[in-house]
Image (cartoon, rainbow, N blue to C red):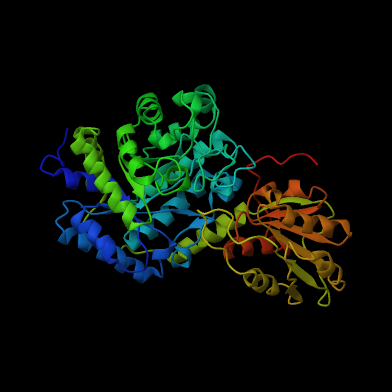
Amino acid sequence: MGTYTDSMTLEQQIGQTLMVGFGGTTVSQEVIDLIQHYHIGNIILFSRNVRDAEQMHTLTHSLQKAAREAGHTHPLLIAIDQENGIVQRLGEAATLFPGNMALGAIGSEKIASEVAWATGRELKAFGINMNLAPVVDVNNNASNVVIGVRSFGEDAQLVARLGSAMVKGYQDAGIIACLKHFPGHGDTTIDSHLALPTIPHTLERLDAVELVPFRSGIAAGAESVMLAHINFPTLNQIDILPATLSSTVIQGLLRHKLGYKGVILSDCLEMGAIANTFGTERAAVMGLQAGIDLVLVSHHYTQQRGSFVAIKEAVQAGTLAPLIVQQAAERVLDLKARYLSWDDTRVDIDYAAHEQLQDQAYELSTTLVRNEDALLPLHLDAGEKIAIVSPQRNTMTMVEDRYYSDKMLLDIIQQYHSNTNILPVVPEANYREVLLNASDTDIFIVVTANAYLDEEQAKIVQFLVSTGRRVIGMSVRNPYDLQAYPQLRTYIVAYEYTRPALLAAVRVLFGERQARGHLPVTLPER
């Protein structure tokens, strides 16, 4: 094997199989050390690394400069999770687009592809060359705490269509796409950032549901696939072995059954599902042995350096075949040769066109689930009062990026009806007294985020509905919130708490736009 790796040392090859992250908005001395002395060839960025567009370009340029000066033969892979929606690491440095479930509510391959292409162009302008997206998990479990709106929906065929469209959009823009989380993270109730979920499904079930979008995405030319930290005991025939470390899943299922020939990534080995069971450094060796090409150690220098050392020592001890490392490095370098260049990546961006697409996509995604009393559109006299009640938590899982303040929604609604305020409600406190004292309020807009999993949020909506007041429920996350307060008669879904999503929803509330989205998941009957 080999073309690119023939003249490389073992240490250089190992460096190509590791992807690392770091803190701060400038290049840290630790990451310089990893690039120079440990030959690390791949970087992952997070929101902690982002300030603005110019800083991002400077950062990625500095990283590539460090690699070139260290004698790297190929540029760095620089990756990010810019899924859009609730996982959008670039924040307001880039154009915000709807996340997957909002795109699922639209159901258009054309819109999905255009969103991916526009996102990809902006990533390229920042010097990022790989997007760890799209998520193609089928969200067929309402209690899934980590995927939810990151999925296109519960229909495997819908997920397959839109996922494949996004793969093509990203890669047409010159960005490496990544299908995740193989073989499917949609039917879990445990966040793998914290612990190891188990899915008992048989191969036949996976083949009929979870694998459908991966087959489609692979056929569309996806250049990389990320493995899930999920235990599939029926596949492995042993009690505890996450897919990330399973040769049965990686070699048997992904490589041989699905015929995948591209680069295979682990999810981050510092996540609780791995760190608390096998340990990061040991898992780095196990992952390569199982067939992973690119091992992610996203956060801590000691674990990153330790993973490099563990791999090297395993090869020297004869427990990890050097050919395995070479083959993994070769696949990574082949991918780099086809997509990456040392040249400056600045491209002209038509931001006006991207903003038009943003507006169109959010308008098409907004979903009015119930309007049983014809309360919408709102036609209020100037003296009538709106109160925003927003008891939701900020972030629900470790993967999400931060929410914005309640004032953002207030500012938007006040553009349409100035007599609006925020009613401060703390779920665990005496919210009944606060709400009952708001006797001068004519309309309550209650904003919830996964209230069906949060009894305290649900109680507030249930109490308001029980008083007979006019209440509008607005979900800024999974649409399933309605099952926590089934008697609510007016319910709209925005899918995320971002300014463009809220603006689109408010436009529907006041009749400026029509709600055009369709739920991509099933809600139980009342």
Q: Quadrant of residue 422?
A: bottom right
Q: Nearer the viewer, residue 295 or 411?
A: 295
Q: How many marks?
A: 0
Q: Quadrant of residue 122?
A: bottom left
Residue 350 in view? no
Residue at left offset 55%, top offset 27%: 201
Answer left or right for 314 relative to 508. left
The image shows residue 494, relative to residue 351, as above or below, that is above
Residue at left offset 65%, top offset 46%: 518
Q: Residue furthest left?
A: 7
Q: Nearer the viewer, residue 148 or 16?
A: 16
Q: Position of residue 133 (x, y in %)?
A: 43, 47
Quadrant containing the N terminus in the rendered view: top left
Q: Position of residue 448 (x, y in %)?
A: 69, 57
The image shows residue 51, relative to residue 460, as above or below, that is below
Q: Position of residue 204 (x, y in %)?
A: 52, 22
